[in-house]
Structures are given as C-alpha cells and as structure tokens.
Amino acid sequence: MANEEVLLTRGGLEKLEKELFFLKSVKRKEIAARIKEAITFGDITDNSEYEDAKNEQAFVEGRIITLEKILRRARILEKGDSNNNFVSVGSTVKLKDLDTNREYTYTIVGSAEADPVENKISNESPVGRAILGLKSGEEVEVKVPAGSFKYKILEIS
C-alpha cells in the first residue's frame, strides 16, 4: 500500500476530511488540556491520568498521520466511473445467497471507506474481490475462512 491510490467516494472523502479536521482542531486541544492538568497532580511517573492522556495523544497523532496519507493518495470515484453493466468500485449490488435464499445489498468501496454496518464492503474483501467485473445474473462462489458461499448477482446500480 506504499504509494497505491486509495479509492474514495465523494461522501467518503468528506467523512475522512471531517474526522481529520476534528482530530486536529478539537481532539488535540482536549488532550493537551488533559496532559497539562495531569502534570499538576505531581510526579508523572505513577500518574495514570498522565499516562492515559499520553496514550490517547499517541493514538490520535497516529490516526492523523494515517488520514493524511489516505487523503494524499485519494482518487475520487465520480458517478461516471462506474458502469451498471458490471460490478465495479462504487456499484451497489444486490446479491442472493443461493444456499439460504437471503438477499443482501452492498456498496463496493475502497478499503479506507469500508463499513460493514452501513453495508459498504471493500473491493479488497473476499466478497468484493469475487464479484468485481461480474454482470447481473452471474453466479460466484466466495471462499472465506469460515467456508464458502454461493451468490447470484441480482442487480447492479
């Protein structure tokens, strides 16, 4: 992932930019205030408040670096980039599990934007990778650590 471009939708880009702005403008100040307050408690060698604040600071600074790298390498997927004839990044796909007859709807996104709770799966996930380039009506078997699943692509939008 050294210099690979990161695929993002316009909404995904905005979400990451908002998170970066919040971390830099609000969270950094909150943590600095916590550290300053913890120092007033005296010796910092056995000060759990100080230790917690420093750990949170390290996490936030790491996340800021990660977000900045993602945003530097971002390529925005425009509406015209996807073709409803076949599955591509940016497509919303309705799948039918051929074993259970349950239907699932997923939006295929870049890995930085994946969010299973919102039914956004990465193009690098087992399902995402297996259905890329396929057309509506096609069937695919997806191998995952828990076994394998057979899906039929019902609709691409």
Image (spheres, rainbow, N blue to C red):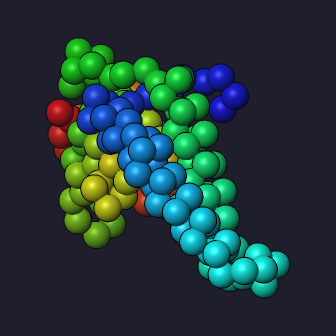
Left or right placement of residue 132 versus residue 98 in this view? right
Number of disc labels: 0
Left or right placement of residue 150 versus residue 129 in this view? left
Left or right placement of residue 107 versus residue 33 in this view? left
Does residue 92 sit above or below 33 in this rendering?
A: above
Q: Residue furthest top?
A: 80
Given residues 146 and 8, the one toward you in this image is 8
Left or right placement of residue 46 versus residue 4 in this view? right
Given residues 55 and 3, the one toward you in this image is 55
Residue 128 shows in this picture = no
Query: Where on the picture, by quarter, is residue 41?
Result: bottom right
Query: Where on the picture, by quarter, is residue 43?
Result: bottom right
Give the quarter of the figure containing the N terminus: top right
Given residues 147 and 106, the one toward you in this image is 106
Does residue 48 sit above or below 18 in this rendering?
A: below
Report x, y in % for residue 47: 72, 82
Report x, y in % for residue 81: 30, 17
Query: Where on the picture, by quarter, is residue 78?
Result: top left
Identify the residue at horizontal 32%, vertical 61% (top origin).
Answer: 117
Give the quarter of the figure containing the C terminus: top left
Identify the residue at horizontal 69%, vertical 28% (top origin).
Answer: 2
Identify the residue at horizontal 53%, vertical 23% (top origin).
Answer: 73
Residue 57 shows in this picture = yes
Report x, y in % for residue 108: 35, 40
Given residues 15 and 129, the one toward you in this image is 15
Does residue 47 sit above or below 57 in this rendering?
A: below
Does residue 131 sit above or below 117 in this rendering?
A: above
Identify the residue at horizontal 60%, vertical 39% (top origin).
Answer: 65
